[in-house]
Amino acid sequence: DGGITQSPKYLFRKEGQNVTLSCEQNLNHDAMYWYRQDPGQGLRLIYYSQIVNDFQKGDIAEGYSVSREKKESFPLTVTSAQKNPTAFYLCASSISAGAHFTGELFFGEGSRLTVL
Amino acid sequence: GIQVEQSPPDLILQEGANSTLRCNFSDSVNNLQWFHQNPWGQLINLFYIPSGTKQNGRLSATTVATERYSLLYISSSQTTDSGVYFCAVEHNTGNQFYFGTGTSLTVIP
């Protein structure tokens, strides 16, 4: 089945530790995104990538890092510099047919990170 | 960025009732999507609707891009419709979607 797989679904970490969230898609989409959701809030964009080896900061990139070495993979690292890392993290992808067209957005099931 | 406002923020319905959810946005958009977030957090695509009207079973949506709003209609609501409904728009500069804060719907039997 085509889709977006995020892992792990639940993750606990101690303060001061970096953690990496995995996102893999087999939809052959060019664009991939990471969003953060806090309780009772909408989604906020952390980073996005339209092509391999290229990515751009979203609205809340501080304390996060990403890489895009393969088209199907877009891992997110939550670093110790992120002041409030406890949140629900969602990965998405879209076809991204051009510079001003993103296409329909599809989401994975999310990863819930708790910092102890 | 672009501002996206959804109303009402919370809605409680008796099973079988109809409802209308609204999404207003502050600038021209290329695209607009409606999502349903289920209790486990997954975002389910409902409609991809930059303009016009679409229907899918008991749900339908209308986007009037020139007036900067979209409406999601839910008819004959069921308890499984409960959850949070999000509107997301892609600014006409492209490349990313901006989300509203959602409408939390509770359908009671």
Image: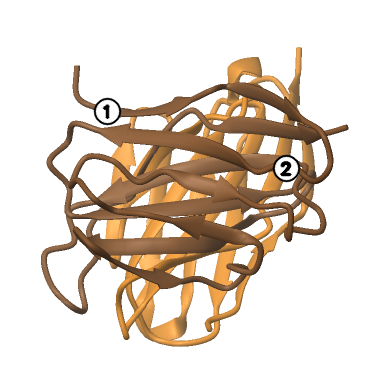
Total numbered labels placed on residues in the image: 2
**Letter of the chain shown orange in the rendering:** B
Disc 2 residue type? Ala
Secondary structure at badge 2 equals: strand
Same chain? Circles 1 and 2? yes
What residue would you read off at disc 1?
A3
- In the visual, does A93 lie left or right of B5? left
Residue B25 in view (yes/no) = yes
User: Looking at the picture, does residue B31 appear above or below residue A105?
Assistant: below
What residue would you read off at disc 2?
A87
Q: Position of residue B37 (x, y in %)?
A: 57, 35
Q: Position of residue A69 (x, y in %)?
A: 24, 50
Q: Please report the residue visible at 39 percent of the width from the left and 86 percent of the height from the top.
A: B28
The image's colouring method is: by chain
Residue B74 in view (yes/no) = no
- In the visual, does A116 lie left or right of A112? right
Disc 1 residue type? Gly
Frontmost residue, A19 versus A107: A19
- Mark 2, chain letter? A
Q: Please report the residue visible at 39 percent of the width from the left and 62 percent of the height from the top.
A: A48
If the image is split into quadrants, where does the C terminus of chain A sit?
A: top right
- In the visual, does A46 lie left or right of B40? left
Q: Please report the residue visible at 49 percent of the width from the left and 47 percent of the height from the top.
A: A76
Q: Colour of chain A?
A: brown
